[in-house]
Amino acid sequence: MSYICVSTIEYTIIRTRILDEMRQLDDITEPQRNLTTRFTILGFGLVGGLVSSLAISGLILMVEKVTAVPLGTFYMVLVAAITGSQVYSVNMIAIGLSLHLICGSILGIIMALPFAYLRKGSIFQYAPVYGLVFGLALWSILFLPITFWMVLPLISSIEIQPISQQVPTGPIASIDNSKLLEMANKITFGALPFNMFYGLVGAIVIKSLSENYLRKRRSLEHSLKNAD
């Protein structure tokens, strides 16, 4: 009987020491897990920004097609504003599209910051609203200054060759800088829903990916604790 009591006490002591060591290990690794989670969510921001940018690019091309504007005009003018080039080519469309996707992906990381550093109950619950507000801020802080300080001055100050879209039978769409200037107001205010749509889609993608990741992580941690 005494032997059983001693063995029970020894087992209790050993088990207590093991649990204490596990708690200390958890205290050490918890900041590392938090850091990993935050970087993972920021990665989801990159994905959300890219997906949103691809969606916006598709909408831009669709609007250009419907309004009989040469496809890729937006990207040509964007690259021309950055480089000051007065010669348009297909390569400029590819460069402009690439820049648009890269910038959209980076902005997605910025959009994901609240998801990575704020409490889940706050930002996750109002993710669509946050996305719309982010898009509005993006239009105000980024799109308007670029349009009024870079793009419009370029178009109005230089004589650039008309942008045209051709097929084997001949040109099917064309636009020059005077028509672009006439459409400036429509383009500027029409860009607002595009930017808000970008923010909405990006926020929804980040929210969905982050919730799925956090759910799987909690399930794994719960399983490990039960195994202990």
Image (cartoon, helix red, strand yellow):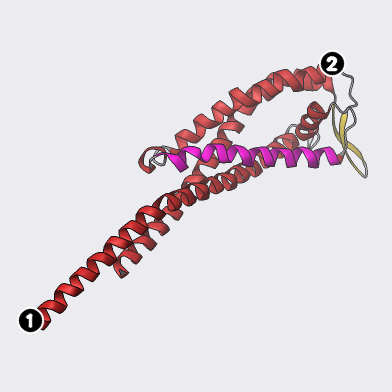
Residue range (magenta): 91-118
Question: Residue 109 location, x and y as percent?
Answer: 57, 41
**Foreground mark, 1 or 2?**
1
The residue located at (80%, 33%) in the rendering is: 76
Q: Is residue 13 left or right of residue 89?
A: left
Residue 176 x, y percent position in the rendering: 85, 24
Question: Toward the viewer: 176 or 100?
Answer: 100
- Residue farthest to the right? 169
Q: Disc 1 designates what residue? A: 2
Give, as a three-letter code, the residue at label 2: Ser
Label total for image: 2
Q: Say left or right for 32 vs 197.
A: left
Q: Is residue 3 left or right of residue 170?
A: left
Question: How far from the left and from the top, in percent, is residue 32?
Answer: 45, 52
> Does 76 appear above or below 43?
above
Residue at 59%, 28% (x, y): give it.
Answer: 138
| Dot 2: element | helix
Q: Amino acid at mark 1?
A: Ser
How crowded pointer 2 is (Cα within 10 Å; few <14, some 14-19, many 20+) is rated as: few
Front-most of 228 and 5? Answer: 5
- Which quadrant would residue 77 be assigned to in this image? top right
| Magenta stretch: includes residue 65 | no
The front one of 23 and 89 is 23
Q: Mark 2 highlights which residue?
A: 157
Report crowding for label 1: few under 14, some 14 to 19, many 20 or more residues within 10 A (C-alpha). few
Q: Is residue 117 rendered magenta in the image?
A: yes
Q: Residue at (18%, 70%) from the top-left corner?
A: 12
